[in-house]
Image (cartoon, grey):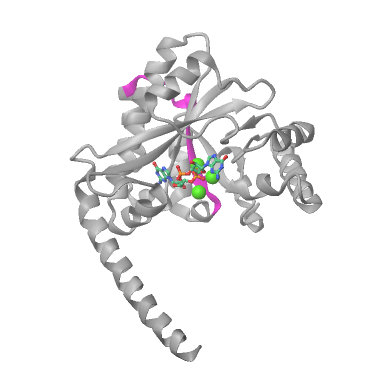
Amino acid sequence: AKGAGRGGVQVFDEAASRRALDRLELRSDLAHAVARDELVVHYQPLVDLLDGAVLGFEALVRWLHPVRGLVPPDQFIPVAEETGLIADIGTWVLDEACRQLAEWQAEHPGRALRMSVNVSAAQLHDPTAAARYLQGITAAGVQPRDVWLEVTEHSSVRSEVSVFAHEMHRSGVRFALDDFGTAYSNLGDLTRLPVEALKIDRLFVSRLTADRAERGLVQAVLAVARSLDLQVVAEGVETQEQREELLALGCRQAQGYLFSRPVPAEAAAELLRTGTGM
Ligand code: C2E
Ligand code: CA
Ligand code: CA
Ligand code: CA
């Protein structure tokens, strides 16, 4: 067993250095990704839990690497944050998502469609970020109030986020606190930030029907949201049971595989026309 352990360590070391090399390679490739047109935005519908109607979308970036294929954001967003490339990538995603929103709003003039875009704390060190974002929104011709920026609790405690958030908020852009519940000790941020929605983390939704305590937590989040006059979006709804439980608790808005995975723009446009079928 001891020998196998040593062998295991050696294998682990090789794997670790391969990963480090991999990261270096990703780093240099990512520097060209925007210019080479390798990024794409997929869209996951935000739905009304009652009838599955599409209320809007969350823009989620993907990297179509020429050799590796589709690289998920969890693998390259941290690299982009480390290298500062997130500024370019974030601007690109926002511009693209706003252009897409304008197109869909023109096709569906009667509907109040919104677009959510994720923002990393690392993007906000840049004092010109707010101006750049507002420029993208204006250039696309969409209303700032239809654009939602999703920040995490982790990033929201940082003062520069707050400055950025207040500047954007003054212009009408709205904020949602992402992954809510993963660090609920920071509830105080809610009163300091111009947040208008909470997104309940997928972890809580996944345990909702199995665990009484989890149900209590979601109930508490909904109570906080109500008292602060915030909207609530449940993330990661995968089953009818979860949907029914959320509705019973008074939550109306959600995203999740039950309705649709994030899909390319053409498929999202189709969902807008036909509904999610749920
Ligand atoms: P997030 O903002 O919490 O996004 C939700 C993630 O959950 C997405 O993963 C989505 O595909 C996944 N998801 C949605 N519904 C379900 C479900 O029912 N079940 C399960 N198992 N998963 C579901 P994705 O697209 O891989 O994105 C991962 C994270 O990468 C995002 O988490 C976000 O933090 C980050 N990200 C994505 N796009 C961007 C971007 O443009 N900018 C920045 N800064 N971060 C981004
Ligand atoms: Ca998000
Ligand atoms: Ca989330
Ligand atoms: Ca997240």
Say whether residue 79 is magenta: no
- Tell me residue 79's x, y (percent): 33, 57
- The residue segment tinted magenta is 140-153
Q: Quadrant of the C terminus?
A: top right
- Tell me residue 96's x, y (percent): 33, 30
Q: Quadrant of residue 251?
A: top right
Q: Quadrant of residue 246?
A: top right
Q: Nearer the viewer, residue 202 or 103?
A: 202
Left or right, 69 with reference to 115: left
What residue lies at 42% left-to-right and 10% top-to-bottom? 107
- Tell me residue 227's x, y (percent): 74, 38
Inspect this view and state whether residue 143 appears.
no
- Tell me residue 204's x, y (percent): 67, 48
Inspect this view and state whether residue 262 appears.
yes
Q: Is residue 86 above or below residue 270?
A: below
Left or right, 28 with reference to 131: left
Q: Nearer the viewer, residue 5 or 231?
A: 5
Left or right, 260 with reference to 132: right
Q: Is residue 17 above or below residue 236?
A: below
Say whether residue 141 is magenta: yes
What residue lies at 59% left-to-right and 26% top-to-bottom? 47
Q: Nearer the viewer, residue 268 or 55?
A: 268
Q: Which corner quadrant of the figure contains ligand 3? A: top right
